[in-house]
Amino acid sequence: MKILGCFKVVPDLDLIVEEDWNIENHLHIDTGYAKLIWNCFDEGALEMMLRLSDLSEGLNVVYKLSALTIGRQKTENFLKTLYALGFSEGARICVEAEDEILFSPEMISEGIANYVKKIEGQDVILTGIQSSDGNNKMTPYLLAEKLGWPCITQVIGLEPIDEEHLKVTSQVSGGCIVRKVKTPCVFAIGNAPCSYLRIPTLKAKMKLGKRPVTRLVPEDMGMSETAENVRVTALNPIDKKRNTVVIEADSPQEKARCLYEKYLKERLSEL
Amino acid sequence: MRYHFVVNGYADDVLRQMEEQMGFAQKYLNGMEQGEAIIYCRSVEDVQRLERHHSKEAVLISAREYAPEAVLHGLCDRIADGGLYIFGNDDAGTELSVRMAARLSGSSVTEAENLWLSEESAGDSELINKIHVMKMVYANHMEAAFVMEREPYCISLARGASSQELRVGSFVIKEEISCENMAEHIVSQEFYPEALTGGLDKAKVILAAGRGVKNKENMAVIDKAARGLKAEVAVSRPAAMNAWKPMNRLIGVSGAMVGPEVCITAGVSGAAAFYAGIEKSKFIVAINTDEKAPIMKMADVAIVDDFLPIMEELNNICK
């Protein structure tokens, strides 16, 4: 079974200095200086693929794991980590300007769909449910529509069954649903319980992590002619500050007592 | 232009979702004509049992089990013209709004906070209405305005929107479209109710732990203090990803959105995506060793110190 994990590498938004959020009349924020990290839902998706592969040992199912990202050259280090973890194919659709893909889920899903149609056919595609910067929450659904595949959302677990089926756990209101699903299918990965990606060994990095990444151009993936149906027109900063009182005292115990006596006791007694 | 509510009749919280749809319409859709609601549900009986409504008439799309492919089939068959379609704020609403717009060559925005109309010239002195929507982006650090280019306009609502009381009485059901057996990719399925979470959404006091708690052993100290304070324990995303608590204790844009009387955060940096989950709290306390952590400016009271002795002392006091 061929499984594609689509991931986005995003800036660590916690590292953006406050002044940069307060810029007006711009349609994107300069996050170029921030450390790059896996988008958390995509990271969960990639780890889920590796776990699925682990679980298939002893079963008569072979999973071929591939990964695709759309972004800058810097993201290739992330693909090389995936090679070291056992992914057999890594591809990047080369887009150097982050603002071109930030609010462009139509273009992103078109690129992924064309990769699957033209470059490497797949049985299953995993993507995180949303990215932390664009927050579009649309890519897996648009991708399913472009491929004419079904989609299952808020997936939190995958287990092997056979070459054409997977056991899929997804979160729904009031609980979770476990389904036997026939491929092909798109899975939108939600709050998976173990979502940190494992770390490859140095030996694996040396042996597997140096393989070249397949580079693709957006024009060949039909991304240039894709028009967005929704256009961003303004970005506004949000002021969340409260008038904070800082409790000062000589010891943490005194601070705790002050917190309780002055601010909590009455509030808690009223509940 | 008409607007229509699209309602998830399968959801346990269907009435709350309808209240939020109604609140949104009252705030932002004044003067716009309301059309029939579209309700996807198990059966007519489920809808009649609601005994509340926010539209006079409704069209039902029914199937015993919820499958987005089945609902989309019914939705896209039924919708002949443009207009604005307002979906609820759950995952089903988000998915269906995006996929319906894609199938009907319309446009969609998820988690909409706000909406307004503008008039733009379409040539020959003709004026056309444009729909603009505001939503949070950059993990809730910024809000962005979008203009929607094509009808039908499909939006799903952001969570935590203001709500409006529903009208007493039932929908007049105009039509029922049955969509059984349309999810051929599902071979079998079983529902497992979740173990009780203590209901973060209803908690009066919440003690939220973040990355600064450092390990699972320290979470035991948080648990103990929470028992003393009669608080529910919640966690930020880094703590949940480390499995210090199950994912159903996650607070933030992708977890629970809470509004307790008191929310105490320990070792939480205050990432915007987390803060969005607690910003409706009446009173916020932040405990962090880093006085420059963002949470320290977003709390009502802050303590710059290690959370461990503070928690232990709070527990002693509550004894």
Image (tube, coloured by chain):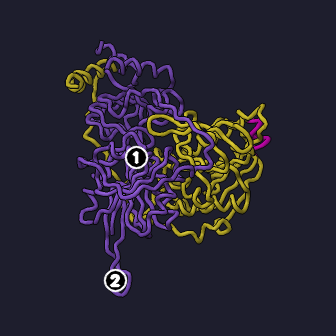
Q: Quadrant of residue B26?
A: bottom left
Mark 1 sits on what residue?
B9
The answer to the question of whether label 2 and label 1 lie on touching residues, with beta carbons closer than 8 A, is no
Instruction: Check disc 1 and report its element: helix, strand or loop.
Output: loop
Please report the residue visible at 46 percent of the width from the left and 48 percent of the height from the top.
Answer: B92
Please report the residue visible at 58 percent of the width from the left and 57 percent of the height from the top.
Answer: A143
Q: If you read the primary sequence from the N terminus, does the residue marked by circle 2 or circle 1 appear first?
A: 1
Is A207 in the magenta? Answer: yes
Asked if residue B298 is positioned above or below residue A136 in the image, the reply reads: above
Point out residue B93 in the picture as x, y percentages from the top left corner: 43, 51
Residue A47 visible (yes or no): no
Query: Which chain is mark 2 on?
Result: B
Q: Residues within 10 Å of mark 1 (few under 14, many from 20)?
A: many
Question: Going by the image, does A121 lie left or right of B111?
Answer: right
Tint of chain B? purple
Asked if residue B304 is positioned above or below residue A225 in the image, the reply reads: above
Colour yellow, chain: A
State the quadrant of the C terminus of chain A. Answer: top left
Point out residue B147 in the picture as x, y percentages from the top left corner: 40, 66
Q: Nearer the viewer, mark 2 or mark 1?
A: 1
Please report the residue visible at 41 percent of the width from the left and 22 percent of the height from the top.
Answer: B222
Is B12 in the magenta? Answer: no
Residue B56 visible (yes or no): yes
Mark 2 sits on what residue?
B126
Q: Foreground: A228 or B186?
A: B186
Instruction: Check disc 2 and report its element: helix, strand or loop.
Output: loop
Q: Foreground: B58 or B84?
A: B58
> Which residues, given as a range, are shown in magenta?
A202-209
